[in-house]
Amino acid sequence: MKIITKNTDYAIRALCAIAKDNIIISASKIAKKEKIPLPYLHRVLNKLKKEKIIESKEGKNGGVKLVKEPSDIKVSDMVRLFQGEIQISQCIFRKNLCPNRKKCLLRKKLKKIENSLIKELDKITIETLTKDREEK
């Protein structure tokens, strides 16, 4: 089980790089700075653009910049965007919902953990990550 996948990680790192100076920055600069393969980064940036989190400018001085405030971009939103809903267990048995799902004692405990995880991820924003990075 992965809580944060590669695409989500790349998106968060790219957003932090963009937010750092809040100016237009090229994808190649982000890729080099964050050590993200450029083809992956392009896919991630296209998704962020489609969701109106960033905007892009074409041309010689082109690149991307944030549309949303860094304080409004939560890690939990990035997880949902790139991975879907945050789930520890899907309660799937042979491609069908588990018949014991409503009475399952483990599921109740896992749901509590999921809810706690979501609350914690909601507290982490691109702004807080960027500030943490600057303090190091």
Image (cartoon, rainbow, N blue to C red):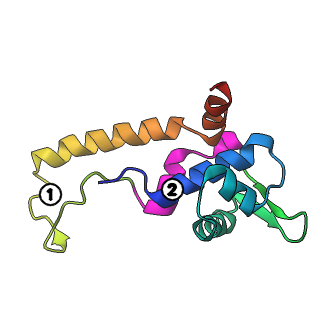
List the residue tagged with mark 2: 8
Q: Secondary structure at mark 1?
A: loop
Query: Front-most of 113 and 5?
Result: 5
Residue stretch rendered in magenta on the structure:
69-85
Which mark sits nearer the N-terminus, 1 or 2?
2
Q: Residue at x 68, y 30 (%)?
A: 134
Picture coordinates of residue 9, whole percent (x, y): 51, 52
Query: Front-most of 25 and 95?
Result: 25
- How packed mark 2 is, by other alpha carbons closer than 10 Å (few <14, some 14-19, many 20 or more), is many
Q: Residue at x 61, y 67 (%)?
A: 47
Q: Is residue 126 magenta?
A: no
**Residue 61 as seen in the image, left or right of residue 71:** right
Q: Residue at x 11, y 45 (%)?
A: 105
List the residue tagged with mark 1: 101
Picture coordinates of residue 124, whole percent (x, y): 54, 37
Picture coordinates of residue 69, whole percent (x, y): 73, 45
Depicted 99 relative to depicted 117: above or below:
below
Q: Report the predominant secondary structure element of the magenta stretch.
A: helix
Q: Residue at x 48, y 54 (%)?
A: 79
